[in-house]
C-alpha cells in the first residue's frame, strides 16, 4: 500500500514547476501502478498549449474556472469543478485558466518524475518503456 500526503509531496522534488503550472506528482512510474497521478495547478492568465504525443491524460477539475480548446476541432469547452476531460487521442489543446485551476490528473504511460513540456507541448517518451533492442553480433 502506498500512502502519501499532498503537503509532503509539495515540499519534495516530486513537486515540479514550469511556466504556468506546478504539479505535485503523487504516483510515478517507479511506484509500479501503470499510471502516474498528479495534483496540478495551472495559473490564472496563462495559456498552456500542449500536445501529449507519448501519453494519454485524464483530468478532473477540482477548483477554479477556465477553458480548454481542442486544436483539432476548434471546439472550446468550459472548465469548472466537476468537469473531466480525457485526451484519448493525444489531442492538441490549449488550457486557458481564468482563475488558478486545481486539477487531479492521470497519465498513461506513467511519467518518471521531472518531465516538463518540450517545444511541441509534449512530455518526452520514457526510453525505459520502449521495447528492448535486440542484441547483434
Image (cartoon, grey):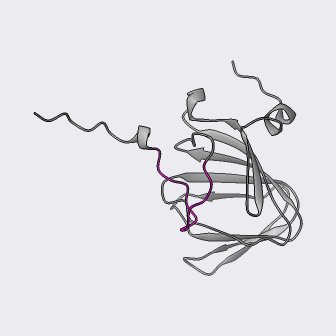
Q: Please give left or right for residue 72 compared with residue 94 in the image.
A: left
Along the viewing direction, whichever of 132 and 102 lies nearer the viewer: 132
When asked about the image quadrant of residue 129, the answer is: top left
Identify the residue at horizontal 37%, vertical 42% (top origin).
Answer: 130
Q: Please give left or right for residue 109 compared with residue 2 in the image.
A: left
**Is 122 colored magenta in this rendering?**
yes
Residue located farthest toward the top when viewing the structure as drawn:
1
Query: Taking 71 as reference, is 82 above or below it?
Result: above
**Is 84 colored magenta in this rendering?**
no
Residue located farthest toward the left when viewing the structure as drawn:
137
- Residue 23: % across, % down: 74, 48
- Residue 50: % across, % down: 61, 66
Query: Taking 106 as reference, is 50 above or below it?
Result: below
Q: Please give left or right for residue 19 compared with residue 88 in the image.
A: right
Along the viewing direction, whichever of 130 and 119 lies nearer the viewer: 119
- Residue 88: % across, % down: 54, 58
Q: Which residues are magenta?
A: 115-126
Quadrant in which the N terminus is drawn: top right
- Residue 9: % across, % down: 79, 35
Query: Taking 125 as reference, is 132 above or below it?
Result: above
When asked about the image quadrant of residue 74, the answer is: bottom right
Identify the residue at horizontal 86%, vertical 67% (top origin).
Answer: 44
Identify the residue at horizontal 57%, vertical 43% (top origin).
Answer: 111
Query: Taking 24 as reference, is 68 above or below it?
Result: below
Q: Please give left or right for residue 114 compared with residue 22 in the image.
A: left
Along the viewing direction, whichever of 18 and 46 lies nearer the viewer: 18
Q: Dominant secondary structure of the magenta stretch?
A: loop
* Numbered label tally: 0
Quadrant in which the C terminus is drawn: top left
Identify the residue at horizontal 56%, vertical 41% (top origin).
Answer: 110
Amino acid at each position: 500500500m502506498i500512502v502519501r500526503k499532498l503537503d509532503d509531496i509539495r515540499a519534495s522534488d516530486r513537486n515540479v514547476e514550469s511556466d504556468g503550472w506546478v504539479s505535485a506528482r503523487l504516483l510515478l512510474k517507479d511506484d509500479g501502478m501503470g499510471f502516474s497521478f498528479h495534483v496540478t495547478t495551472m495559473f490564472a492568465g496563462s495559456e498552456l498549449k500542449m500536445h501529449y504525443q507519448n501519453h494519454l491524460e485524464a483530468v478532473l477539475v477540482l477548483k477554479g474556472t477556465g477553458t480548454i480548446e481542442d486544436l483539432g476541432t476548434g471546439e472550446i469547452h468550459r472548465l469548472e469543478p466537476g468537469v473531466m476531460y480525457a485526451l484519448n487521442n493525444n489531442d492538441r489543446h490549449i488550457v486557458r485558466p481564468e482563475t488558478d485551476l486545481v486539477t487531479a490528473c492521470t497519465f498513461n504511460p506513467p511519467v518518471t518524475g521531472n518531465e516538463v513540456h518540450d517545444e511541441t507541448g509534449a512530455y518526452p517518451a520514457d526510453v525505459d518503456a520502449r521495447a528492448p533492442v535486440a542484441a547483434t553480433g
